[in-house]
Amino acid sequence: MPPDRDAIDLTFDALLDWRDWIPLLPEADRKGRIVAPSADRSIVELPYGLMLSPNAAARWSHATRPVTHNGRTELWHTYLTAGDPHRPFSVTVLQPEDPAGDREDVETSLTEDDRKKLAGRTAEARTLILSPMGGWLDVRGKWYAEPYITRWQHKITAGQDQRVVIQREDGFLYPFGQRAALIEVTERKLWHPPEEAQPYALLRKRSFIVIKKPDMEYQHGLMALQQMTVQDLVTPPLYKPEPVSGPFWIETDENTPFLFRFRALDWAGHRIWLEAPAIFVTDEYKILETQDLYEEKKYETRRIHPLRGQPAVVAKFKPEKDDGKDRWGEPLSKKRSQGDTMLHVLHIEFFGVPNRVNEEPPFFCRTARMEIRVPSLEQYLNDEQNKGWFELVDPDTADNFGEIFARAHGPAKERIPMYFDEQSDRCGGVAAPSFDVDGL
């Protein structure tokens, strides 16, 4: 009761007028579990398995007499407000001492684990109405500094969930490094089986990957691209046959990975387009486990991405050290330019290595190998001959005196052959040398 009152009139209007009544709030421990629950505390079980406790400024408001419109009388209901009925108010999410487990007869929008992780947090309620037919609720919360669940939205009408959004995990696309999040959406949808006369309003649960930071820049010397930008900011519904706790391939059907579209820039700023699948890894940084999953032999085709011969400047020389001389101090035949490392890339493969520095992302994306054509060899070799796998070498390392930026990768049969035994008229000399291209 208000502090200036010590009695309530024993009338219908006075007993139902709660506008000045001060809520008694429950006590809770650090984990958000209610300590010593009591029947005189202001608390509402809504949604299933969770308790919502209002702040001290909240008040219940409702009509004290029947409300009738055109011969129809409203169902009695009361709504919670913090003064202005159009302004949101804060509520604390709590759990009883003996929390409810998952129901076996029906799949709930929130799992038992979700409810445990939401307990103790403060959310913003836009609607909280109680009636004999159940409650109406619109509650939302964002917790960027909290682990596991960073966003929650829950809408209920007449005691039934209508739309629930849970952003369960923040993480990254492996091996590319873009910041992403795993979001689960539960919605009530009509379903009408052909053999039934009436449709059913059932809950349908779907998961998505949402890209939070689409751009990723690469500064180290073993990456063929300086920037990659994800074009698909939301995936189609994901295929997940069972809950996944660790890293997983982002798939839209069984054994069908989703191909993210990337707009990339090479080291001269030229635009490159490619499509590639990715693994979602959470902020728990299970990088070694992610590497093992990525490098499984059955996923080899997922690691190799076609570029269809797009020209790309794949290595960067440090221009501030370019004084027109080589590492021995001898004058260069021509000034170095970024175009000197331009190749026609047929396929490219990436991998991730752990980032030992306390920065995001927790891994570096690097180029494992590339299948390329060398433009300067086109006058000597046909397209089938002028094709080989190479890996990058940092051209600016101290011991790289030959300024090699790529070296042959794999067995000899995958290298570019320079055999002039039968083409001595095209090599312009007396001898006809033959060799494999081992470096560029």
Image (cartoon, rainbow, N blue to C red):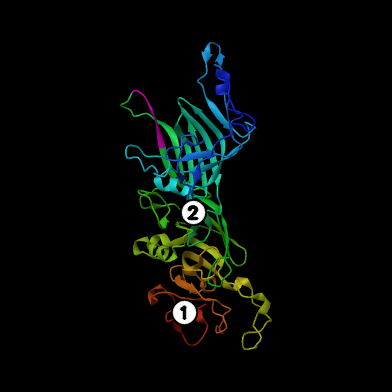
Question: Which quadrant is the N terminus positioned in?
Answer: top right
174 left or right of 265 in image: left
Q: Secondary structure at mark 2?
A: strand
Q: Which residues are magenta?
A: 197-203
Expressed as whole percent of the image width and height from the top left, the position of residue 387 reads: 45, 70
Q: Which residue is mark 1?
A: 438
How many callouts does the rendering have?
2
- Nearer to us in this view, 409 or 1: 1
Where in the figure is residue 299, as x and y percent of width and height? 37, 61
Q: Amino acid at mark 1?
A: Asp
Q: Which one is in front, 24 or 144?
A: 24
The correct choice, above or below, for 83 with respect to 383 in the image is above
- Distance, label 2 to label 1, CA atoms, is 33 Å
Given residues 166 and 27, the one toward you in this image is 27
- Residue at 56% x, 16% y is 67
State whether residue 3 is above or below residue 169.
Answer: above
Residue found at the very far front of the displayed protein: 6
Q: Position of residue 273 (x, y in %)?
A: 54, 57
Q: Residues within 10 Å of mark 1 (few under 14, many from 20)?
A: some
Of the numbered discs 2 and 1, the one sitting upstream in the chain is 2
Does residue 360 appear in the picture of this structure? Answer: yes
Q: Is residue 200 magenta?
A: yes
Q: Which mark is residue 260?
A: 2
- Does the magenta run of residues contain 79? no
Residue 237 visible in image:
no
Q: Closer to the camera, 136 or 36?
A: 36
Crowdedness near tag 2: few (<14), some (14–19) or many (≥20) residues, C-alpha within 10 Å: some
Q: Secondary structure at mark 1?
A: loop
Task: Please identify the quarter of the rendering in which residue 278 is found.
Answer: bottom left
Toward the left, the furthest residue is 195
Q: Residue at x 66, y 84 (%)?
A: 325
